[in-house]
Image (cartoon, rainbow, N blue to C red):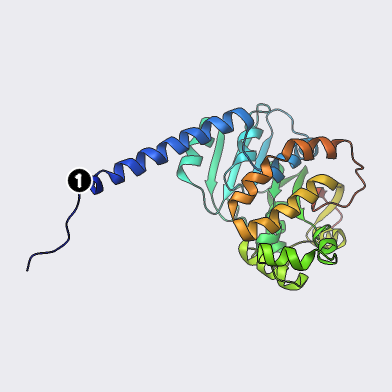
């Protein structure tokens, strides 16, 4: 029995066309990144604070734990004559090749079992990782094992939302819920956000008191902290999170367009404002 399926000449060239379009998009993305950097709103706002808290010197060993796409790893490798090791449980081959060209050492490994010797690392950067893991104490214990006595850990951790609860208490919330297709209660919203962002830990965010206690229990003490982003960055970030639930990654790409406004406004705003994320410098507590 002959098949009735017929392929038109146009159908034979579509895969090639799709490949060409994909290649063009990748080239365009590289051009954009070369001009303005990685389009990550939150990480760009936190970068100056991270560099200051890391306080790196030449010839030090820096570990970017939970490095993901290794944006921070690549930028750190350009700062000074550093050994930068990017560790993540899943690394993309293309990004790993790019990182190697920048002098980064990509390592595919779990944060629970870092393949480094005891007291062999000067600094550890842990960006938005602590709340993602089921066993945060085990992760911090491993950090303490590989850190040198005079080394320290810098981590960014989500704080409780500052603007979303206020928005939920306003008269506009019911209309926003219908437009963005959001749940009406804060508890339901947090559950959905934790699911969408694949939060695997016991908490989707950490109040400062809880974070401080967790660090102390695992041999660290808070040496310095601040909230980054501050007032305007936190406002834009939380609005972006709500929009993400309705529009996906398009919302975050649009959010990046507001980065210059948020950066300038936060630069002159009060550092005492409680923002959407903690930025913490934690040193080894030698008394524990």
Q: Position of residue 42 (x, y in %)?
A: 71, 45
Residue at x 51%, y 48% (from the top left corner): 91
Q: Looking at the picture, how far across and down is residue 83, in whole percent? A: 62, 34
Residue 229 seen anywhere in this rendered image of the structure: no
**What is the secondary structure assignment of the residue under circle 1?**
helix
Asked if residue 35 can be seen in this view, the reply is: yes
Q: Nearer the viewer, residue 90 or 11?
A: 11
Looking at the image, residue 80 lies above or below residue 249: above
Which residue appears farthest toward the left when viewing the image? 1
Question: Taking 155 as reference, is 109 left or right?
Answer: left
Q: Position of residue 105 (x, y in %)?
A: 55, 38
* Residue under the point 62% across and 45% down: 253
Q: Residue at x 87, y 47 (%)?
A: 223
Residue 60 locus on image (x, y percent): 69, 33
**Neighbourhood count class around disc 1 (C-alpha, 10 Å): few under 14, some 14–19, many 20 upward:** few
Q: Reply above or below: 200 against 11.
A: below
Q: Which residue is depicted at the point 55% across and 54% down? A: 89
Nearest to the observer: residue 273 or residue 176: 176
Rendered position, 147 above or below 162 = above
215 vs 162, nearest the viewer: 162
The quarter of the rendered structure image containing the C terminus is: bottom right
Image quadrant in which the N terminus is located: bottom left
- Residue linked to disc 1: 9
Front-lying residue, 208 or 238? 238
């Amino acid at each position: 029995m002959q098949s009735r399926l017929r392929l038109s000449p146009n159908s034979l060239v579509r895969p090639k066309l799709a490949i060409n379009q994909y290649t063009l998009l990748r080239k365009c993305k590289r051009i954009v990144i070369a001009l303005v950097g990685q389009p990550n709103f939150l990480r760009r706002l936190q970068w100056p604070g991270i560099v200051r808290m890391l306080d790196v010197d030449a010839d030090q060993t820096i570990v970017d734990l939970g490095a993901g796409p290794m944006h921070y790893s690549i930028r750190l490798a350009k700062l000074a004559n550093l050994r930068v090791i990017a560790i993540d449980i899943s690394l993309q081959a293309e990004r790993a090749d790019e990182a190697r060209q920048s002098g980064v050492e990509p390592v595919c490994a779990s944060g629970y079992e870092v393949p480094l010797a005891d007291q062999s690392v000067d600094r550890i950067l842990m960006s938005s990782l602590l709340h993602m893991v089921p066993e945060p104490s085990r992760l911090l214990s491993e950090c303490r094992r590989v850190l040198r006595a005079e080394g320290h850990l810098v981590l960014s951790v989500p704080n409780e939302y500052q603007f979303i609860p206020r928005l939920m208490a306003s008269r506009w919330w019911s209309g926003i819920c219908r437009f963005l297709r959001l749940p009406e209660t804060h508890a339901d919203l947090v559950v959905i956000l934790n699911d969408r962002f694949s939060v695997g830990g016991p908490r989707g965010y950490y109040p400062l008191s809880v974070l401080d206690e967790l660090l102390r229990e695992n041999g660290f003490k808070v040496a310095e902290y601040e909230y980054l982003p501050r007032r305007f960055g936190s406002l834009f970030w939380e609005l972006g999170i709500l929009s993400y639930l309705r529009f996906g990654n398009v919302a975050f790409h649009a959010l990046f367009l507001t980065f210059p406004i948020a950066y300038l406004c936060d630069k002159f705003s009060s550092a005492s404002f409680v923002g959407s994320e903690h930025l913490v410098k934690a040193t080894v507590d030698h008394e524990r």
